[in-house]
Amino acid sequence: MSTLDPNDIEAKKDALIWSARRCFDLGLQTNAGGNLSVRLSAADAIVIKPSGVGFAECTRDNLQVVHLDGTIEPSSFKPSKDLDFHLNLYRIRSDINAIVHCHSPWATGFASAGLEIPCLTVQTIEKIGRMPLIPLSSNGGPQTEVEITPVFKDPSIRAAVLANHGTIGVGPTLTKAQYLAEIIEETAHIAFVRDTLMAAHGKTAADLPQYGTAMEAKAARQAS
């Protein structure tokens, strides 16, 4: 196992506490569900929220340090039920340095209806591109690394929705993964409002953006 740097651990714990509190304050996660983690800079290990600890209760003392080989540094808390899929994503994607997994209500509503959230805003096209819907495990239980890892082997995937469960946002930093978690929930809310208004006004189709930025659209025009 690689040597741990206490300063690195402290900084990553503080970043995770900030992200967890932001998720809680925005209503992306209540109670002790969901999870988030961040890769350490100086070791093959992560900081992750343990089981039974709410996003609003994360502290330097209760966050766990886990090596990518699965070894858990001494802790009085139970490891997260989602630990295996977090570790697997870090192992297969060197570009992933943070994971935010929430049970945010609008997105989970789409997931529970078996609907993939459409990328219907220019921001979602630019920042995410597509949010695959990952089905429940073969026995009807929550998704594990068996269902989640194959989806994220595609390096273009930065977000996914878990059927009847929640969402996953990944990124090169915890802040960027956090922002994706927010965009997923915002997009689900917008999609619901759009679909409700379209139904009320008898509309069956609406335009969708093809590009996420004006620069991309301009480049496409010039190439045609």
Image (cartoon, rainbow, N blue to C red):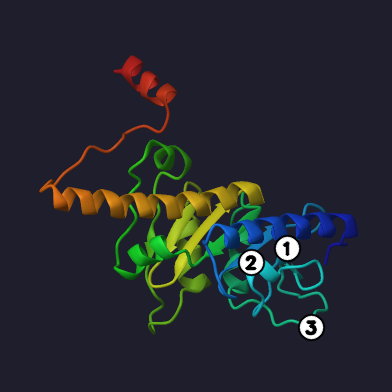
| Residue closest to the eye, 18 or 39 | 18
Whether label 1 touches label 2, CB < 8 Å: yes
Name the side, left or right, on which 194 lies relative to 68. left
| Residue type (three-letter) at the residue carrying disc 2 | Leu
Please rate how many residues cluster around mark 2, counting C-alpha atoms within 10 Å: few if below 14, some from 14 to 19, many from 20: many
| Residue type (three-letter) at the residue carrying disc 1 | Ile
Location of residue 50 (image quadrant): bottom right
Q: Nearer the viewer, mark 1 or mark 2?
A: 1
| Residue type (three-letter) at the residue carrying disc 3 | Ser
Q: Return the mark for residue 87.
A: 2
User: Which residue was labeled with disc 1?
Assistant: 46
The location of residue 106, given as percent across then percent down, is 39, 61
What element does badge 3 sit on? loop
What element does badge 2 sit on? helix
User: Which residue was labeled with disc 3?
Assistant: 76
Mark-to-mark CA distance, 1 and 2 = 8 Å
